[in-house]
Amino acid sequence: MRPKKYPLDPLVRVRKERVDASVAALAKSIRAREVAEDSRAVAEAERLRAAEEAKRTRGNEAEALARGELSAADLQRQASWQARTQWDDAERARRVVIAREQEARALEAERGARAGASDAEAAAKVVTKHREGWVSDSARALEASSEEGAAEAWRRRG
């Protein structure tokens, strides 16, 4: 007697496809989070670098002023430069905030994708476990049937 085909094979296939799709979505969301982290780190490093450069320049200008090497026009340019530096720093700070927000959204999306992958794997595991039980039950039933047939054949001889 040929063993029966598992009746929920289509469900097994669908659940496996969902697991594959959710794992792919998780991989994509992890990559997006990594890109967002890198963007945030670059924005923060750029802001820090520019702040250090401005600090050095202000120090050099203060030393030159103390030595009497600067004219009124130089002081006016310094004030303009200082205003521009503050504007640039505000812009860099805005970029850092945006990068942090994007990173937070990417992290939240990754958490959601992890939960989706976990749910899909759990659902697939339930069907797989059921299938294993079904196969085991079918094998026992087939064995019992063949033993019963053998016992019946033995009784007929006797």
Image (cartoon, rainbow, N blue to C red):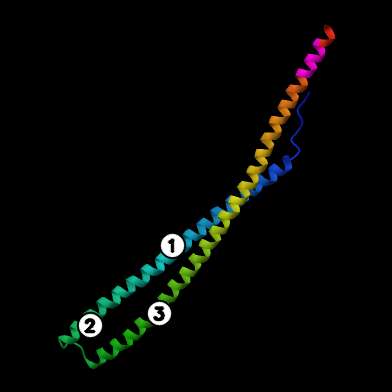
Q: Quadrant of the N terminus?
A: top right
Question: Eyeballing the image, is 146 above or below 85?
Answer: above
Q: Secondary structure at mark 3?
A: helix
Provide the residue designation for mark 1.
38
- Examine the rendered structure and indicate whether residue 76 appears above or below residue 27: below
Q: What is the spatial separation of the Cα atoms under label 1 and label 2, in whole angstroms?
A: 34 Å
Task: Give the residue furthest to the top.
Answer: 158
Pair 3/2: label in front? 3
Residue 126 placed where, x, y %? 65, 43
For the residues bearing labels 1 and 2, Cβ distance under 8 angstroms: no
Residue 90, numbered label: 3
Residue 61 vertical position relative to residue 22 in the rendered view, above or below: below
Along the polypeptide, which appears first: circle 3 or circle 2? 2
Q: 12 or 133: which is nearer to us?
A: 133
Name the foreground residue: 102 vs 143: 143
Q: In terms of image quadrants, where is residue 54? A: bottom left
Q: What residue sits 43% from the left and 71% below the top?
A: 96
Q: Is residue 139 magenta?
A: no
Q: Rate crowding at label 3 as few (under 14), some (14 to 19) or many (20 or more) other CA atoms within 10 Å.
A: few
Q: Residue at horizontal 55%, vertical 55%?
A: 28
* Residue furthest out toward the bottom: 72
Count of residue discs = 3
Amino acid at circle 1: Asp
Q: Nearer the viewer, residue 50 or 41?
A: 41
Query: Which segment is the magenta one?
Result: 147-154
Amino acid type of the residue tagged 2 in the rendering: Glu
Q: Residue at x 37, y 78 (%)?
A: 89
Nearer the N terminus, badge 1 or badge 3? 1
Q: Are there few (<14), some (14-19), or many (20+) residues within 10 Å of tag 1?
A: some
- Along the viewing direction, whichever of 98 and 3 lies nearer the viewer: 3
